[in-house]
Amino acid sequence: MISSLIITASPAQKTEISDTLKKKNWAVAMYLGWKIGGPCKQIEDAMVTNRFDDYKGGGWFGGTGTSHPYTDHIKPSWMISANYNLKSPFSIGIVGGKTNLGCIHGYKIETFGHPLDIDFSVINFSPIFSYNLYDILRIGIGPSVYFTKAWESSYHAEGVDVEYKHTKVGFLINFGLRIPQKSLLFFELNCQYRYVGKAEIGPFNENPYRDALQKIEVKYNHAFIGGGFGVRF
């Protein structure tokens, strides 16, 4: 009799657990990552054309010096997502976050040596419709609103901040790999291609005694690659 009860209870327990797992329709996650692409290469080329490509020596205390222009990517980017499972295998979701596209450093020896540093970022908000495979793989697409920003972070004795902001409408293609399957907590690797379009920025370094980097139209399109942890409920 005991054996019969155990055998009867075991499948029932498994079914109950399975049903509980299937009821977890919501998933929320946060990611850290980096970008590929963006406007940095175009600005580097513009700096070369405008002669912000001089070599900066090591200074009074030695050092190897630096060749300009160059781009650093030391600032990470972040993203938050929320997804809701519709009738299998589809889901809807919302993603948003801030992507740091890099800081470009230029230098001109004229006028006692003058640096020109320009930072780029974009904030996005995107609803996504996705196809899910076994609650592990996801591919989705959706429209996006992008808030682009470019600003001069070089020192200004006159204390004037130079920045250019635009609101753009584009789209986003999303790929996700989420493991383990149907667990309460999960890890997800996320890759996105973001079509932002072009934006006009500049001029930078405007000063009666200095040469300016003239107005230029750049592409903000980029890819985001990130990883993060989330919870199903």
Image (cartoon, rainbow, N blue to C red):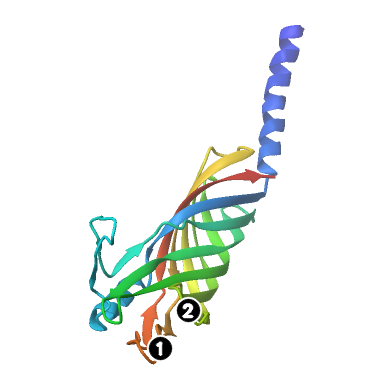
Crowding near pointer 2: few (<14 within 10 Å), some, many (20+)?
Answer: few
Mark 2 lies on a secondary structure that is: loop
Q: Which amino acid does label 1 sit on?
A: Asn
Residue 100 in the image: above or below residue 189 = below
Residue identifier under label 2: 157
Which percent across, then down, holds residue 71?
33, 65
Which percent across, then down, holds residue 95?
58, 62
Q: How far apart are marks 1 and 2 (CA)?
A: 11 Å
Does the rendering let one see residue 136? no
Residue 124 badge: none
Residue identifier under label 1: 207
Tell me the residue at 27%/81% (across/down): 110
Q: In which quarter of the image is residue 45?
A: bottom left
Q: How many labels does the image show?
A: 2
Q: In the image, which is nearer the foreground, mark 1 or mark 2?
A: 2
Tell me the residue at 39%/83% (across/down): 205
Tell me the residue at 54%/72% (across/down): 144
Residue 123 in the image: above or below residue 27 = below
Residue 118 in the image: above or below residue 202 = above
**Residue 153 versus residue 37: which sits nearer the camera?**
153
